[in-house]
Image (cartoon, rainbow, N blue to C red):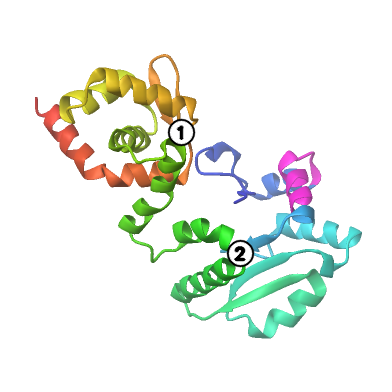
Amino acid sequence: MYKYHGCITKPEHIVLDYKQYSSEIHGLSPDSECLKNLIQSKTFVFIGAGLEDPDFNHVRDYLIQINQPSSIEFWAFMRNCEEKVGFYKEQYGINLIHYAGEGKDHSDLLNKLEELLRKISAVDSRKIDAVELANSLATTSQRREGLLKRTLVQANEQVIPLDEQILGFVAFFDTIEKEECFRYLCEHKGNAIIDVRNRVDYLVNRKLLKQTEHVLLPVKGAYSIEAAAMIEDDIVQYLAGRDNG
């Protein structure tokens, strides 16, 4: 996923007005150069992106000058685009994927995405895990029995409930002081402090968790999200009891 116009986490860098567009197009923009290189080496799928965006057009036209449109792997979801399919393919090398809808209705896009995910998993079984996580129809319980379980089994040859509790608590807060984490795991969940410390060290050594001297941080993996979702209700109960005395 490439956020070409910036990210809401750094609003000062978001490209919005003419001056910013001009700077991106005509200046020495590392984002622009990175996008050019990525498009020449990767397959891009545009979802909810404007194919007439000035920045994108600049990069697209540059690539067409140095490559044939047929050599560029572009795919894009576009609503009610049947009449534009041939034009975009011939002129720009962009393969349009049609979905139906009017006004603010984009519900058919989800149907097309799910159809695409099924095709991907049928062609390449190695991508089944990614497809399961991306599929909007997958339930939380299904995901819990998916990547989180397989990750812990790969690390331990068994699923240790304390590992799930640690990963879930840290991921829920994204960054948490060790003292608070140990309080939850020991006082609220009844684990021995020595067991908690040992499992934290083990998860850090296995690169499933990160730490500083006083803080624990999650690894940005899908299994962390699953772990947080699994114990969310218990954490809310713990916080309510802590705040009430």
**x then y, percent, for residue 2:** 62, 50
Q: Which residues are magenta?
A: 26-38
Specify the amino acid type for callout 1.
Leu
Q: Where 42 sits versus 242, above or below? A: below
Q: Is residue 104 visible?
A: no
Quadrant housing residue 218: top left
Q: Nearer the viewer, residue 146 or 188?
A: 146
- What residue would you read off at disc 2? 124
* Residue 85 located left or right of residue 106: right
Q: Quarter holding the C terminus?
A: top left
Q: Where 107 sits versus 164, above or below? A: below
**x then y, percent, for residue 185:** 24, 27
Quadrant housing residue 153: top left
* Residue 237 located left or right of residue 123: left
Q: Residue at x 35, y 21 (%)?
A: 198
**x then y, percent, for residue 193:** 25, 19
Q: Residue at x 88, y 66 (%)?
A: 68
Specify the amino acid type for callout 2.
Asp
**Which mark is drawn over residue 208?**
1
Q: Nearer the viewer, residue 56 or 208?
A: 208
